Amino acid sequence: MLQAMERIIRTDTMGEIKEILRGVRLLNPLSGFDGIVDVAVEKDCIKWIRKTSDAPSGFWLFPGIVDMHVHLRTPGYQKAESLQTGLRAAVAGGVTCVGMMPNTTPCLDSLDPVIAVEELGESYGLAEICPVPCVTAGRAGEVCVDFEEFARSGITCFSDDGSPVKSNKALMQAFQSIAPFNGVVIEHPEVISLAAGGAVNKGLASKETGAKGIPESAEYLDVERCIGVLRDSGGDARLHLTHLSSPESVRQAYEASKNGLRVTCDVTPHHLALSEEAVIALGAVAKMNPPLRSEESRKMIVEMIGSGMVTAIASDHAPHTVEKKNLPLGEAAFGITGLETLLSVTVDVLVKEAGMKPIDIIRLLTSAPAAILHSVFSDIAPGKPLNMVLFDPEQQWKYSSTFSRSSNSPFFGRTLTGKVQRVWLKRELYREGEFV
Ligand SMILES: [Zn+2]
């Protein structure tokens, strides 16, 4: 594969073509194009794409990943992550747009702090931020934020993530308020009374570790509630159900969409790749909410993704300090980092276990989440600004260093398959482990 990398010709001495990526497998999720081509890259855009007579290099080239569920911990918890470290971790993972969750301290429930975070993020010239402010003031689940004010600034995605939108009345009001501007509520589905005090899956993990269990019903009963409220609201608004871990949740989301409701959902790479065995073996570094489920549920979810029942894959990147993770299971914080491993883990599992085509996997990571967030998205085409990732699907690498400020990942120290080589957004940002 090194040889293949060397065949990417650099012509940056004279003229406008900076380099030609030769024999790359171009995966364009919107058009469905999947073929081997040469791509001429200028400083800030694609010059041309041509059929190649070269042998395939083995590399994939596709649009930058849109990770719709990311915790950047700013403001309030920069010990675990800063905007800059989080956005660097994003780029290193091939992510060029992040949906930023609002459960910061204070939480993002009014326009000014949201704009401030977005502008600070932009100043780094790394991945773009798609802000996802709260649905309710203080994420308390009762009083809705001023949706119209956000919409006037082009912000149309809302979530109380970390918690569900607790009151049906607030959820109903949210749906009715956001429908006119085609907004979306991103729900973290959880029935608090069923999950309270829990740390791991209710079943083998709770039995083996002695920690309190969280049943799958704590998730799918809230999925059912939200779909019901959406239906009662008139059904014009959009509901996105995030980080689903239970096959029953996925089934309900899919059924609702088949019945004409505008319901979408995502699953995280860790729920695809790991079962509750991981938290039994590794402890708090594999503690997250929702918890890793049974091997049976994991397999069913992988199968459901393969049959097109899941809309998107998102990392739920949730950095934490060592102090907050290095605790007994019951006390440790929920969540793991995921931006840098999202692509490798997802591609590896979905190719091997679900037999999915690369382009269908890339769609789950790019154009599908972009359509939910309404973020700017385009295929890789002549004249388009640069927004793309060069990926080696075969390369084995050890995940042993990170651009994030935190390393609370069960994949840390493990050997993974498939590595991001280079990333462009407006210009070249990242090449072989380093920022350009
Ligand atoms: Zn959540």
Image (tube, rainbow, N blue to C red):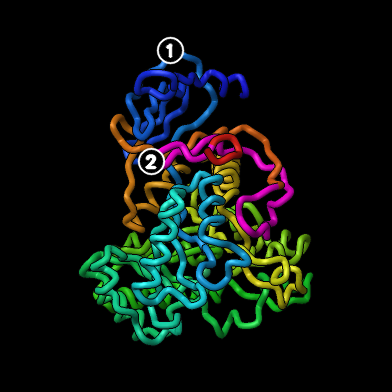
Q: Which amino acid type is marked by label 1?
A: Ser
Q: Would you call the spot at circle 1 few (<14 residues within 10 Å), some (14-19), or many (20 or more)?
A: few
Residue drawn at (66%, 78%) of the image: 198
Residue 412 lies in the magenta stretch? yes
Say left or right for 180 vs 397: left
* Residue 80 drawn above or below residue 375: below
Q: Position of residue 70 (x, y in %)?
A: 50, 60
Instruction: Kindly tell me whether residue 30 is visible in this rendering.
Output: yes
> On the image, numbered disc 1 is attached to which residue?
53
Instruction: Work out whether residue 76 or residue 238 is closer to the camera in this orientation and state it.
Output: 76
Instruction: Work out whether residue 162 or residue 137 is closer to the camera in this orientation and state it.
Output: 137
Residue drawn at (49%, 32%) of the image: 60
Residue drawn at (29%, 75%) of the image: 147
Instruction: Give the quadrant of residue 432.
Output: top right
Find the distance from the CA under tag 1 to the CA under tag 2. 28 Å
Residue drawn at (72%, 59%) of the image: 278
Helix, strand or loop at label 2? It is loop
Residue 114 lies in the magenta stretch? no
Q: Position of residue 105 (x, y in %)?
A: 51, 76
Residue range highlighted in magenta: 401-430
> On the image, numbered disc 2 is attached to which residue?
426
Q: Most extreme residue toward the front, as rendered?
A: 13
Helix, strand or loop at label 1? It is loop
